[in-house]
Image (cartoon, coloured by chain):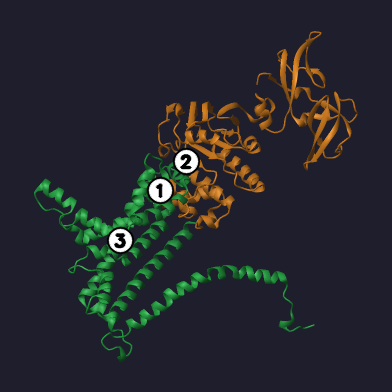
Amino acid sequence: MNILVEADGLHKRYGKVVAVQNFSHRFAPGKITAILGPSGSGKSTTLAMISGLAEPDRGCIRLDGTDITRLPAERRDFGLVFQNYSLFPHLNVLENVEFGLRVRGVRKAERRSRAFASLERVHISHLAGRRIHQISGGEQQRVALARALVFNPRVLLLDEPLSALDAKLREILRNELGRLLRELSITAIYVTHDQVEAMSLAYEMIIMHGGRIEQSGTPLEVYTRPATPFVATFLGSANLLEGECLVVNGETRLRLPFGELPAPMGAQTGPCRVMVRPEDIVIAADGDGQLHGEVTSSVFLGSQARLTVSAGGCSLAVDASNEAIPTPGAAVSLRVREAKLCIMPKGE
Amino acid sequence: MNLPASSIPISSGGHARERRRLAPLLLCAPLLLLLLALLVWPLTHLLWQSLLPTDAPDSGITLRNYLEIFSVPRYRHALVWSLELSLAVAAGSTLICLAPAWLFTRCQFRGKRLMRGILTLPMTFAGMIVGFLMVILLGRSGFIPQVLERLTGQPLLSGISYQFPGLILAYLYFEIPRATLTLESALRKLDGRLEQAARSLGATRWQTFSLVILPTICPALISAFAVTFSVSLGSFGVLLVLSIRRFTLLPLEIFTQYIAPPTDQGLAAAMSLTLLTVAFGAGFGLRRFARSREVANA
């Protein structure tokens, strides 16, 4: 269902605390949009406003062009999956899934068959008769999803649905959830603080910080071209360096603490901040890298190692292959992948 | 090598564990002794007394006193009225107090503490004081009947405090704090996100209340009902002021049989044990049912 959800200038304050300010976005119809941010960034409040569970102080929410800002949650036809699932403890699995149909006055026989179909879709129809306390966290998550999807919602909202699960189960369910939502082609808004979850599931990401949108775009855009230092450091690891773009002999060069590099295309001259990811600094085996430094620490991470290298007066995070991990004190020659340098205005 | 059990040395760790296990029991020992002294012996004595006919204590054990409670209309009515009154008060206070308990747990408003204080105030009153308050308000020349008489010229509600509805009102006033506090404590534990989940699934406010909140707080409602029922059944102070000879309840009959000549202590003992059995049985059964609902809701 390719429903277009638009948020325009949403603003919400709780007492003296501004939870969300000036949130505007057109959510991609039929796609998953992840709202990502640290605790207190306003992402759950934004979702609450979209769902109708919280009323914005200012701004409006439109659904296919119709203003639904004052429409109560129960009349929006949105499916909502909560962080703690919020399953009804007095009902069994099947009755929980049926609930959305029951309150819509669907006949018992029909709602039973639809609830079963919804449970089958998430592979837990064999648990239909179980009480909620008799099933595991992962199964509860599936029940919550089946319950939110059973009445064919216009939009599906998910508030950190996997955060209560352990890492392995989270990965399995994340993959299943992504596959299911893509099959359904439903407009989904997915709130999470987990960048891996957001990047692997979402077609588009919104990064929030301090109640504001810091940046939005596809996961690749946001990761490779962060608009602010916050986005750069929040999404993975980043080396943030002070630099200056200048023209030398007709060529735009980027001056960094450890030397000069050709500036990326379109770089403006003047002081700037440069972001480079640890995986975009490689150890030059032949010793002819652009900078030379000394390893100050080395942390084995399984598939690779994270080094801290002191070079040119700065401390750089560098990813190294786990085949030959330099030990602290070792001299290394480093090469920066110039195409991956990201330049941000100095004022940010 | 087989050693006799007594020769196996007990480690100092074992002693420490044993001491830790016994410590709570030792700490509770004074209270347990007091309870035994105040409960077991008087109850045994009461049971013995109830099985002996007062007019011929040497004639042996009999159930005559118990049969008399059910066969003599006055006593039977007293038991039935006691049960009716307690049921009405328990049901009434549980239902009436649901709204304020909800308000206290879910809403922030000016004067909340004052309102809560007023509502829980009757708990600090003795039953007789509540009885006197009812007389002042709804007695034969009480404030409300006087106002109504001035307004309508009719002696409306005059002396209603001495009738069954008046007693219910007085008992309700007395039980409201207990029911409110029991329900408030349960509602505080209710996960507010369940309401949000219900609303997000399309439930109206009424559907959310009837299909989600009410079944979830059912154990708390049963507990509040059980507490108020048991307390009402044994309550005496209010009754002493408001009851008249024409209309009596079992606690008052027990008092009369013990104190007012001609006394019948065997019959009073049988009545006491009957009242105790009903109150304990109802309370125990209802709480067991509430616990089973809690397990189902867990």
Q: Quadrant of residue A315?
A: top right
The residue wearing badge 1 is A102
Outermost residue to the top: A250
Residue A41 sits above or below residue B149 on the image: above
Asked whether A293 or A287 is in front, the reply is: A293
Which chain is disc 2 placed on? A
Q: Which tint was used for chain A?
A: orange
Asked whether B205 or A229 is in front, the reply is: A229
Given the image, on which type of amino acid does mark 3 rest?
Gly
Given the image, on which type of amino acid does mark 1 rest?
Arg
The residue wearing badge 2 is A152
Classify 10 Å Cα crowding around label 2: few (below 14), some (14-19), many (20 and above): some
**Residue drawn at point x = 41 percent, y = 51 percent:** B184
**Residue drawn at point x = 74 percent, y = 82 percent:** B7
Residues at marks 2 and 1, CA–CA distance in whole angstroms:
14 Å
- Chain in green in the render: B
Residues at marks 3 and 1, CA–CA distance in whole angstroms:
48 Å
Q: Indicate left or right for A234 with A15 as reference.
A: right
Given the image, on which type of amino acid does mark 2 rest?
Asn
Q: Position of residue A278 (x, y in %)?
A: 76, 31
Outermost residue to the bottom: B59
Q: Nearer the viewer, mark 2 or mark 3?
A: 3
Q: Earlier in the sequence, mark 2 or mark 1?
A: 1
Q: Position of residue B235 (x, y in %)?
A: 31, 65
Residue B141 sits above or below residue B259 on the image: above
Q: Is residue B81 visible?
A: yes
Residue A271 image label: none
**Residue drawn at point x = 25 percent, y = 73 percent:** B253
Q: Is residue A106 visible?
A: no
User: Element under label 1?
Assistant: helix
Q: Quadrant of residue A100?
A: top left
